[in-house]
Image (spheres, rainbow, N blue to C red):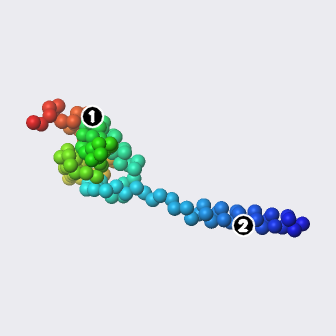
Amino acid sequence: MKINRKLKVIVVLAAVVSITAGATINKPGPRLYTNLKVLPKNITSKELQGIMADDFEDGLGVSCGFCHAANKDGHGLDFASDAKPEKEIARAMMRMTLGINKKYLKLKHPKIGDATLVVSCTTCHKGQAFPDGTEPK
């Protein structure tokens, strides 16, 4: 009988410890990206990937390295870097399309990546890095 009571106490304590430990584990918060100047600072990873893949990769026919500089160690890309001028050009183009959609097409709060945008990268680029098909010199 004493063993049964001790076993019950141990099981209850173990359950309480497990529940408490599970409740206090820090869940990672939303990833905060650095150096965002046009896109929202609190953008989710899913939203950012959608914009980069759908708007830029598909709309311009380019990959990430077109605008993003390589890491100094040569492995991967430094997404926060402004080393490549194409990145600032992309920002200017985002501002331009947002402005056109707001001013001329009367969208109240246009957002890059929003399906309601009428004018987007694809409008002019049509899957090419340069709208007229020729690279600048």
In terms of depth relative to the viewer, which is nearer, 35 or 94? 35
For the residue labelled by badge 2, is the local secondary structure a helix, a strand or a loop? Answer: helix
What is the C-alpha distance between the residues marked 1 and 2?
59 Å
- Location of the C terminus by quadrant is top left
- Outermost residue toward the right? 1
For the residue labelled by badge 1, is the local secondary structure a helix, a strand or a loop? Answer: loop
Numbered mark located on residue 124 in the image: none
Q: Is residue 71 left or right of residue 22?
A: left
Category of crowding for the residue at label 2, using alpha-carbon neighbours closer than 10 angstroms: few (below 14), some (14–19), many (at least 20):
few
- Answer whether residue 129 is visible to the viewer in this image: yes
Numbered disc in front, either 1 or 2? 2
**Amino acid type, residue under disc 1 in the picture:** Gly
The answer to which quarter of the image holds residue 18 is: bottom right
Category of crowding for the residue at label 1, using alpha-carbon neighbours closer than 10 angstroms: few (below 14), some (14–19), many (at least 20):
some
58 over 18 or under it: above or below: above
- Outermost residue toward the top? 133
Q: Earlier in the sequence, mark 1 or mark 2?
A: 2
Q: Is residue 48 left or right of residue 86?
A: right
Query: Residue shown at 90%/66% (left/top)?
Result: 1
Q: Are marks 1 and 2 in contact (CB under 8 Å)?
A: no
Numbered mark located on residue 13 in the image: 2
Residue 83 x %, y %: 21, 49
The answer to which quarter of the image holds residue 129 is: top left
Residue 54 x %, y %: 33, 40
- Outermost residue toward the left? 137
**Amino acid type, residue under disc 2 in the picture:** Leu
Q: Which residue is mark 1?
A: 61
Tally of numbered tags: 2
